Image (spheres, grey):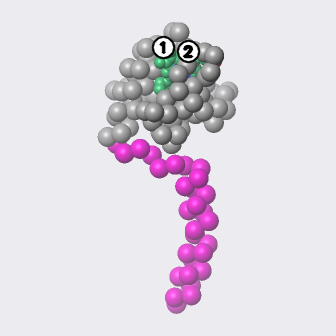
Amino acid sequence: MPSVLVLMLLLASPLALAEVVLLPAAPSPQRQKELVHLVRQDCGSCHGMTLQGGLGPALTPAALREKPAESLVATIYSGRPGTPMPPWHRFLSEAEAQWIVAQLLAGFPSE
Ligand code: HEC
């Protein structure tokens, strides 16, 4: 019986690892609220309060659909040198930037 258990663990762990790599843990519900507020307030000052665009381009699902998610994550985390888009790595983790991009692509939640 125990060997079956070990076998199951061996089979399950690469899958579990793949999930961790592909889907970083979602921020806690409290942190998600803070991130939604940050995006609506701070990002909204350039991208528009409804994220339809302003100084910065629109961040709506339609506007972002064709763009690779990882480059959007990199833009948020590291900024775009030579443009007004600032880096946000002092305020959020890369996993949180990934979470924000996933929300933007799905239609960003209101506060
Ligand atoms: C000071 C103004 C400013 C602020 C604040 C700002 N952005 Fe930007 N952002 C820009 C500009 C301008 C661009 C376009 C850069 C370029 O010309 O490539 C941009 C580009 C982007 C892009 C790439 C869009 C695309 O179509 O490729 C994303 C995603 C993005 N910003 C998200 C955010 C998020 C999320 C925040 C807040 C955490 C934020 N921005 C805050 C000005 C800003």
Q: Is residue 68 visible?
A: yes
The picture quadrant where one finds residue 74 is: top right
Q: Is disc 2 in contact with disc 1, using a CB cutoff of under 8 Å? A: yes
Identity of the residue drawn at 45% across and 20% down:
43
Determine crowd level at label 1: few under 14, some 14-19, many 20+ residues with C-alpha closer than 10 A. some
Q: Is residue 12 placed above or below 38 in the rendered structure? A: below
- Of residues 37 and 89, the one drawn nearer to the viewer in this rendering: 89
Q: Secondary structure at mark 1?
A: helix
Q: Residue furthest left?
A: 30
Q: CB at mark 2 closer than 8 A to ligand 1? A: yes
Q: Secondary structure at mark 2?
A: loop
Q: CB at mark 1 closer than 8 A to ligand 1? A: yes
- Of residues 74 and 61, the one drawn nearer to the viewer in this rendering: 74
| Picture disc at residue 84 | 2
Quadrant the C terminus occupies: top left
User: x, y (%) of residue 2?
Assistant: 52, 88
Q: Earlier in the sequence, mark 2 or mark 1?
A: 1
Identity of the residue drawn at 57% across and 55% down:
19
Q: Is residue 6 placed above or below 87 in the rendered structure? A: below
Identify the magenta region.
1-29
What count of labels does the image hold?
Answer: 2
Q: Which residue is mark 1?
A: 46
Q: Is residue 4 magenta?
A: yes
Magenta-drawn stretch, dominant element (helix, strand or loop): helix
Determine crowd level at label 2: few under 14, some 14-19, many 20+ residues with C-alpha closer than 10 A. few
Identity of the residue drawn at 51% across and 42% down:
95
Three-letter residue code for mark 1: Cys
| Picture disc at residue 21 | none
Three-letter residue code for mark 2: Pro
Identity of the residue drawn at 57% across and 30% down:
78
User: x, y (%) of residue 57?
Assistant: 57, 15
